[in-house]
Amino acid sequence: MPDVGRNTYAASVALDSSAEHPAPVRTVSRLVGEWIGRLGPIWMDGQIAEFRPRPGARNIYLTLRDPDVDMSVTIVADAALVGGVEPPLAQGQRIVVHAKPEYWAGRGSLQFRAKEIRPVGLGTLLEQLERLRHLLTAEGLFSPERKQPLPFLPRRIGLICGRNSAAMHDVLVNVEDRWPGIPFEVREVAVQGVQAVTAVTEALVELDAIEDVDVIVIARGGGSVEDLLPFSNEALVRAASAARTPIVSAIGHEQDTPLLDLVADLRASTPTDAAKRIVPSWNDQYGIVQALLSRATSVLKNRLDRESSLAIESLRRIRTRVTHLIEAGQRDLQHLTARVRALSPAATLERGYAIVTNADGEIIRDASTTSSGDFVRVRVAQGAFEAQRVDSSTEES
């Protein structure tokens, strides 16, 4: 409806009603019906959320839900129109509907009268997914630079999976086998059908807000392309991209690649593979520690042996050096002793020399310092004696 028409309608309602003169319900309902009646038919794309055909009924009702958000409308169609759709309509199926809005004034309800219904084939869905993949790739949501590293050992693991599913069992059992005692925050939700996108997205946001949840695993365990469509939903992919917690996608098998795999920080081929990726093996880590301890012990022992050998060799060298120094000192002492002895007066006396001193004990070095008749003391090698100087002239006289 053009803006002018909407403004005219709004103005007429505002002019014709007030708190003192309110418009009757029938008037408002009639005006709304007239406004909706002026709307033309429109093509809509959605997923059948509820479909319960009744045999013999003239009109068939179904609920068409938006695949990205929790919004839906009621579609009514002739039984003949529904019966002519191939493949037959089923709950969870994607369809395109050409319908015109109808307003039932008596109930104040809105529905859409289907004029044509077309199932969305697998090829069409894949084309839509490919366009979405290109769009998100251009935005950088799948860039490797956005990937967060997984913690070595998470404090708590968030797990989103189907109710009592094999995928949940595989993750819980294999994590317990690898590293016993790690706590889980499990959210069992619909992982298939019209409620899957909303349920998985809400669980993801909830787990991402828990402070000690260090990694979130979204597990399903494979399925058909149609079954895995919720995990290529744009709303879910964007929620995963915005999460602060690292996300592990364990949705399909090797041949399956939902868009969640591309935005996740780590893609696991199966839930069992996810368990192996998010926690280390206790046995492997124990073996690594033991090997490192053995290696450290060996290195330390070799170091001590080497240092001990060096110490022994150093001690031997020191002992040899000290011995050489002592022997050299002894030789020097012997040489010095010999020189001292050679230079001492005793050695001179032993060679037949004598030391002559006067009465004052002074050594007489010059004969003129004594006179004839003076007594002197003569010291020889063995003892001493006194003598009197006698000149030769006195002897002759």
Image: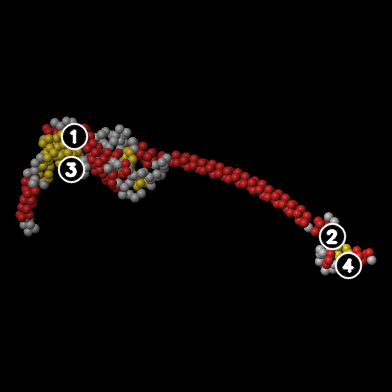
Query: Between residues 179 and 302, which one lies in front from this camera angle?
Result: 302
Residue located beneath label 4 in the image: 372
Q: Quadrant of the C terminus?
A: bottom right
Query: Between residues 262 and 48, which one lies in front from this camera angle?
Result: 262
Q: Earlier in the sequence, mark 1 or mark 2?
A: 1
Mark 3 vs 4: CB contact within 8 A: no
Left or right, 318 with reference to 18? right
Residue 347 location in percent, x, y?
A: 81, 56
Give the residue displayed 74% in from the left and 54% down from the top: 336
Residue 379 location in percent, x, y?
A: 85, 61
Q: Earlier in the sequence, mark 3 or mark 4?
A: 3
Q: Secondary structure at mark 4?
A: loop
> Mark 4 or mark 1: which is in front?
4
In the rendered structure, which amino acid carries the disc numbered 2? Ala
In the rendered structure, which amino acid carries the disc numbered 1? Val
**What numbered label is drawn on residue 120?**
1
Left or right, 289 with reference to 95? right
